[in-house]
Image: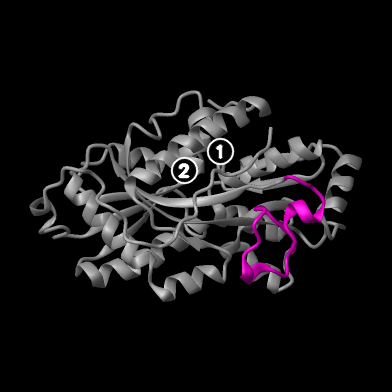
Amino acid sequence: MRYTIFAVAAPLLLSQHAFSQSKPDEAANYPNRPVQIIVPFPPGGGSEAFARSIAAKLTPLWGQQVIIDNRGGAGGTIGSYLVVKAPPDGYTLLMGLNGTHGMAQSLYRKLPYDAVRDFTPITMVGIGPNILTVHPSVPVKSVKELIALAKAKPGQLNYGSPGNGTPPHLQMAVFNKLARTKMTHVPYKGGGPANVALLSGEVQLAFTAVTVGLPHVEAGKLRALGLSGAKKPASLSKFPTVAESGLPGYDENTWYGIFGPAGMPPAIVNKLNADLVKVLSSPELKERFAQQGQEMVGNSPERFREIVKAEVAKWAEVIKELGLQLD
């Protein structure tokens, strides 16, 4: 099968109402106290970069503090479950991604939530490639050379990730499958710790968020081999894609989005969606993340829900073919 991301990019336009029947008065006083966005990873990863940038825009818009709460563990599923158990009043939100809301559903035997049933999707935030990086000690300068080295040393090259079931983990698992290589997965408790391990040479390579890996590539501390997605962002045009660099057909991106608990009032969902799309339309944010290869999205709750459903179905098939399963 072909491993490609479900098409999600869309123009940044104010979406239609989240539900056909909505009570505007429910949202008249929202928010009237601080709002919490849970980032289900430790500090230093791509999820946090999006969350903090959004929070900085929402705080003055609402006149209420938007607090970022890092709750890492189990590939983002622990923090995600905290949102499931929170009151559905719009004051506890989640910065999720295709790991927590696509991959985890089939990867974990005992996942404590259902990615579709137990959440209210608000809007997709952004989508873009990760960057395949290697420690400078690894004697390769292309994906083709990496594949040759991995085949010459099966099981001896270690790749890091922010945790089991995260996009960098599954992106490399798909890489191994397509390239017929055997590189060993070393999971960490978030993108920050995984990046520290890569910089120190504790692991030899990783798919890293561009926001995290690019500064180290530019400083010469890491070497970039390729972008995970088939579509090359203009700001990253100097880098080849993984497909161009030696693995034809490879195409995997990472997306991020805002979720709330299931059962949120429609008017609150509409309010959140409209304000988030307004923030994502900010020229400042669009330019900042475009420089990091990320395309801001800002779609409707209905459209986002359909994307999540498609991601769950896609990764169920991929994970079954890869033969992966975690308790």
Q: Which residues are magenta?
A: 223-249
Is 153 drawn above or below residue 226 in the view shown? above
Q: Is residue 2 left or right of residue 122?
A: right
Q: Is residue 300 left or right of residue 8?
A: left
Q: Amino acid at mark 1?
A: Gly
Using the image as rendered, state which of residue 259 and residue 91 is in the foreground.
Answer: 259
Q: Is residue 231 magenta?
A: yes
Label for residue 254?
none
Disc 1 to disc 2, C-alpha distance: 8 Å
* Position of residue 218 measured from the top left corner of the image (x, y, whole percent): 69, 73
Q: Is residue 207 left or right of residue 300?
A: right
Name the residue located 10 percent from the left edge and 58 percent from the top edge.
28
* Position of residue 90 measured from the top left corner of the image (x, y, whole percent): 22, 50
Is 149 drawn above or below residue 277 in the view shown? above
Report which residue position mark 1 lands on: 165
The picture quadrant where one finds residue 277 is: bottom left
* Position of residue 16 measured from the top left corner of the image (x, y, whole percent): 28, 53
Q: Secondary structure at mark 1?
A: loop
Q: Residues within 10 Å of mark 2 (few under 14, many from 20)?
A: many
